[in-house]
Image (cartoon, grey):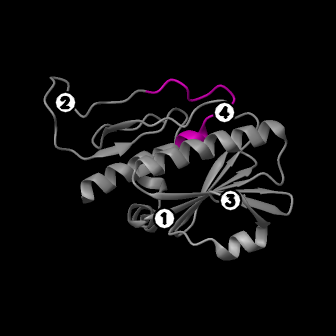
Amino acid sequence: MKKILFAIFIIGIFLLYGCANQGAGEGKNSTVANGTNGNGMNNSTPPVVVPPEPAYDVRNDVPADFESALINASTVAVVMDLRNSNSAGNAAIIKCAAEVAKSMGSAGKNVSNYAYEGNRCIHGDTALNETVADCENSMNADFKFIFVYGDIKTSFGNSSATISVNGAYNGTCEINVVPKDVPPKI
């Protein structure tokens, strides 16, 4: 079970980095290694994520508490903060957030989606319409992904990640998994 959760975590982390680090025509050509040692034999080295170029080395950039919080989270909130964005930025935020939500759902996490626009928050199966403060006060998730408009980057908290994207984001949140002993492309 821990290996499955670790693999799920790796997918989620790469999704974060792939989403937050692609833009302006960079990072579109990435590969997926299949965990073999070149002769078709499966090696036993655990996988690690290597995002598309230009990239972070995920092994060094993700705090340990972030990893454990995401692995152990059963509920995940995906927040799309559209309040300080333009239409191109909104499209990029929604696209990247949807890809992360899909990845987390595929990983067996219970995902709740929230959208902030103006002073309103829309969320839930019934499209509940509340104030942003009401949403934040009632948000009960083990982990939060918060998507905002701004320079393309990712910031980590103890049980959250804030991903800034802008209208220049035109890629996809890709997932690449390679053996841990393969050095990342930087």
Q: Main secondary structure of the magenta part?
A: loop
Point 47% across, 45% down: residue: 103
Disc on res. 23: 4
Instruction: Please say if the residues under marks 3 and 2 sit with CB atoms less than 8 Å apart.
Output: no
* Real-space Cα separation, disc 1 to disc 4, in angstroms: 29 Å
Quarter residue 119 falls in: bottom right
Is residue 57 among the parts visible in the rendering?
no
* Real-space Cα separation, disc 4 to disc 3, in angstroms: 28 Å
* Real-space Cα separation, disc 3 to disc 2, in angstroms: 46 Å
Q: Name the residue under label 3.
A: 123
Depth order, front residue of 61/40: 40
Q: Mark 1 points at which residue?
A: 75
Point 42% across, 47% down: residue: 106
Of circles 3 and 2, the one toward us is 3
Instruction: Please say if the residues under marks 3 and 1 sit with CB atoms less than 8 Å apart.
Output: no
* Boundaries of the magenta span: 17-30
- Above-or-below relation of 25 to 125: above
Q: Does the magenta stretch include residue 95?
A: no
